[in-house]
Amino acid sequence: MSSTWLVGLDVDGTILLQDETMSPGVPEAVERVRDAGHVVTIATGRSWMATRRYVEELGMTAEYVVCSNGAVTMRRVGDEWERWNVETFDPRPVLALLQERLPDARYMVELASGQRLYTEQLDDWTLDGGRRVTFDELGAEPVSRVVVVSPGHDEEDFHRLVADAGLNEVSYAIGWTAWLDIAPQGVDKGTALEQVRTELGLAGEQVFVAGDGRNDIGMFGWASSLGGRAVAMGQAPDVVKDAATEVTADVVDGGLALALNTLPAPAQVHAGE
């Protein structure tokens, strides 16, 4: 049996604190796990544009990185990266439903190319190379994600909206900044990581994932179904903890580092075989 683990880490609330500094001990723990021979990568709702800096800052050497809640998987090619797998959908039906219920919301879509189209700028969005468009132009071609931010609405409002609008035909996640992130049906961080695991030929029971949000539930289900480890951060909502196989400390207390430091070095795995 291979001694190599596939380690997929959420960014916001797992690797990063709310001020975008690293959670205590994370750089050192990532370095230790990487140097032990495991494949350490990121699985995030962020776009690649907003993810690459953390891959580099943490010295990750993984060949694949999962972005946009699983709709985009990047592959390292030499010193550059290519869009290895991109899942898209026709956004027009969901945009029409949302506009009817949230006419004053701000909308952004990510095209298969990675370019972002948006109706109004928001500080939280990484829009380098993006283009401001009319609402109708958002649905001109297939997209890998739709992001909605509606000032004055909180997470519970979004849950009701999803139920009322019948958004079960696409996957959705609600971030900790109370925005709605909509991906192609059946696509999440777990489906993307499964493609990566298969490509790398790694054992299913040796997957380790960590996260803190509702968009990590699919990834947790994937890991636990394979007999792997799904670690919820201590500050995660109960519904996220319930989907995990274990719970670590809060992000502010270095919960990810504590969990990563329980992973064995390959020599320890061999010794137990």
Image (cartoon, helix red, strand yellow):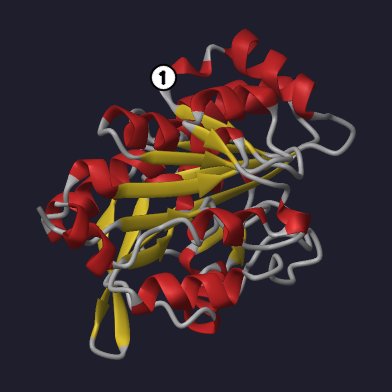
Q: In the rendered image of this protein, does residue 103 appear above or below residue 139?
A: above
Seen at 34% across and 37% down, the residue is 223
- Total marks shown come to 1
Where residue 44 appears, as percent x and y from the top left, is 50, 54
Side of 103 where 31 appears, left or right: left
Q: In the rendered image of this protein, does residue 44 appear above or below residue 230?
A: below
Give the labeled residue for mark 1.
169
Q: In the rendered image of this protein, does residue 11 appear above or below residue 157?
A: below
Can the viewer see residue 141?
Answer: no
Q: Would you identify the image quadrant in which residue 227 lies? A: top left
* Mark 1 burial class by Cα count in 10 Å: few <14, some 14-19, many 20+: few
Where residue 261 appears, as percent x and y from the top left, is 50, 62
Of 184 and 227, the residue lying toward us: 227
Side of 242 where 196 appears, left or right: left
Seen at 37% across and 57% down, the residue is 7
Label 1 element class? helix
**Disc 1 residue type (three-letter):** Glu
Where residue 198 appears, as percent x and y from the top left, is 14, 50
Can the viewer see residue 233?
Answer: yes
